[in-house]
Image (cartoon, grey):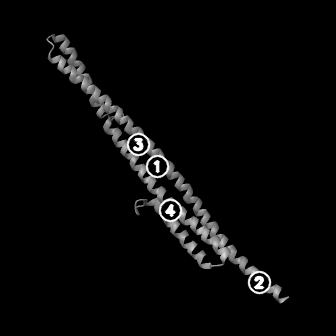
Amino acid sequence: MAEVQEVAEAAKEISSEDRKIALVIAILALFLSFSEVLGKGAQTEAISADVESANYWSFFQAKTIRMTTVHTAAEELRLTAAGTADQTAKAAMEKQIDAWEKAAARYDSEPETGEGRKELAERAKHQEEERNVSLAKYHHYEIASAAFQIGIVLSSAAVITGIVALVWFAGLLGIVGVAITGLGLYAPYLIPLP
């Protein structure tokens, strides 16, 4: 009878330890889910900003082509006007040259619409910076996720092996994961990651 009672007490003690380890696993899994969701969000933001930046650079290139074409046409017409003796035709050509030069200037900078080359370049660079911030966050979240996953594996191994040090190491990895997630949220450039 004493043996049964000792076995029951040992089972109760093991059960209590397993519950604590299960709680550590649950907490690590909770933080893992947070870092994974944040990572996917940052990845999506990076892709969106990259696409938007590419769109602005494409628009920039189209404006550059238009500006170059108009400049070329104006120069060609300027040469033609120089050789024209008819003052009426020459005045019409000068008027067209002036219109093309104004169009070229508008293609280069159009602050009221934000669609001039200079404004488009600024918008593209801003999107590139947003992409870089999102990628920096993403890398932090991925490393944090790895820390949480390793912590879960170590905690699970502690249940099987009974080595309590594995749970302590898993908890330490969890703390590191939370810290790296925090860096990703608030200071993604504090620690440069690949």
The residue labelled by disc 2 is: 9
The residue labelled by disc 1 is: 46
CA gap, disc 1 to disc 3? 10 Å
Q: Which numbered disc, 4 or 1, marks the residue closer to the eye?
A: 4
Label 3: which secondary element: helix
Please give the label number shown on residue 53: 3
Amino acid identity at mark 3: Ser
Q: Quadrant of residue 19?
A: bottom right
Please provide percent x and percent y for residue 9. 77, 83
Tell which circle, 1 or 3, labels the residue nearer the N-terminal end: 1
The residue labelled by disc 4 is: 143
Tell which circle, 4 or 1, labels the residue nearer the N-terminal end: 1
Dots 1, 3 in contact, CB < 8 A: no
Amino acid identity at mark 2: Glu
Label 4: which secondary element: helix
Compared with residue 60, is residue 146 higher up or lower down, i.e. above or below?
Answer: below
Tell which circle, 2 or 3, labels the residue nearer the N-terminal end: 2
Please provide percent x and percent y for residue 190. 40, 63
Amino acid identity at mark 1: Ala
Which residue corresponds to the image point at 66% horizontal and 77% vertical from the top-left?
A: 161
Tell which circle, 2 or 4, labels the residue nearer the N-terminal end: 2
Q: Which numbered disc, 2 or 4, marks the residue closer to the eye?
A: 4
CA gap, disc 2 to disc 1? 55 Å
Q: Is residue 48 left or right of residue 20?
A: left
Amino acid identity at mark 4: Ile
Label 2: which secondary element: helix
CA gap, disc 2 to disc 4? 41 Å
Q: Is residue 83 left or right of residue 180?
A: left
In the rendered image, the quadrant that contains the C terminus is bottom left
